[in-house]
Image (cartoon, rainbow, N blue to C red):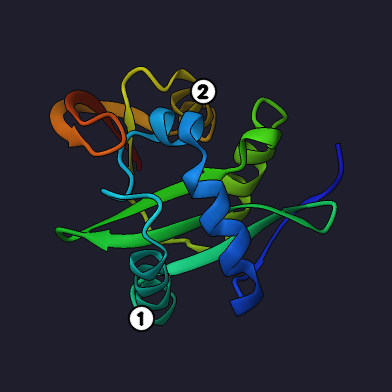
Amino acid sequence: MAEVALRLIDDADADELFDQMRDPEAARMAAFTAEDPDDREAFDRWLSKVRAAPDVTMRAVTRGGRLVGSIAAFVSEGDTEITYWIDRSAWGQGVAGRALALLLDIVPLRPLHARAASDNLGSLRVLRRAGFTVIGTEISHAPARHAEIEETILRLP
């Protein structure tokens, strides 16, 4: 596999990230997405906000120098959580796991938390392999599915 790396997100990444996050199959799997994935103005506002936030560490994920997603750590309700989005073309190839390992190296704060749709087995597998353990579930609104679904909550001590 080509080398997976993290780098700062730059303005030129916005178009590709927007397209990745609009993929209907990927959005359905992620479940907890923007209300309207086709709203470019909302996406640009969101990206600008998270890139400027002092409590967010966001990086572009590259494989062989090509942008294949993003990964971030952010504070929500007092807990630091991680989230990632990997382009569907890179699923099942170890990219998410390697990107997560790299992020864990640059965000030494523990504990960390993560959430995933309970039926997103690939993402749950990535998180468990990284040492996250399930601490609970809850029912949450999943905009990409227009429904309430079960979400698994994980913690890395």
Give coordinates of residue 48: x percent, y percent: 41, 77
Question: Which is nearer the eye, 38 or 43?
Answer: 38
Question: Which is nearer the eye, 26 or 56?
Answer: 26
Q: Residue at x 41, y 22 (%)?
A: 120
Which of the two labelled residues, at mark 1 and mark 2, occupies the earlier sequence position? 1
- Residue at the disc numbered 2: 122
Q: Residue 10 sits in which quadrant?
A: bottom right
Q: Quadrant of the N terminus?
A: top right
Residue type at mark 2 is Gly
- Residue at the disc numbered 1: 54
Q: Residue at x 44, y 76 (%)?
A: 51
Disc 1 from disc 2: Cα separation: 30 Å
Question: Which is nearer the eye, 119 or 94?
Answer: 119
Describe residue 148's horizontal placement relative to residue 115 as left or right. Answer: left
Q: Quadrant of the C terminus?
A: top left
Residue type at mark 1 is Pro
* Mark 1 neighbour density, 10 Å: few (under 14) some (14–19) many (20 or more): few
Give coordinates of residue 141: x percent, y percent: 16, 35
Give coordinates of residue 129: x percent, y percent: 54, 28
Describe residue 120's horizontal placement relative to residue 148 as left or right. Answer: right
- Tell me how many marks there are: 2
* Mark 2 neighbour density, 10 Å: few (under 14) some (14–19) many (20 or more): few
Q: Residue at x 48, y 46 (%)?
A: 22
Describe residue 141's horizontal placement relative to residue 97 as left or right. Answer: left
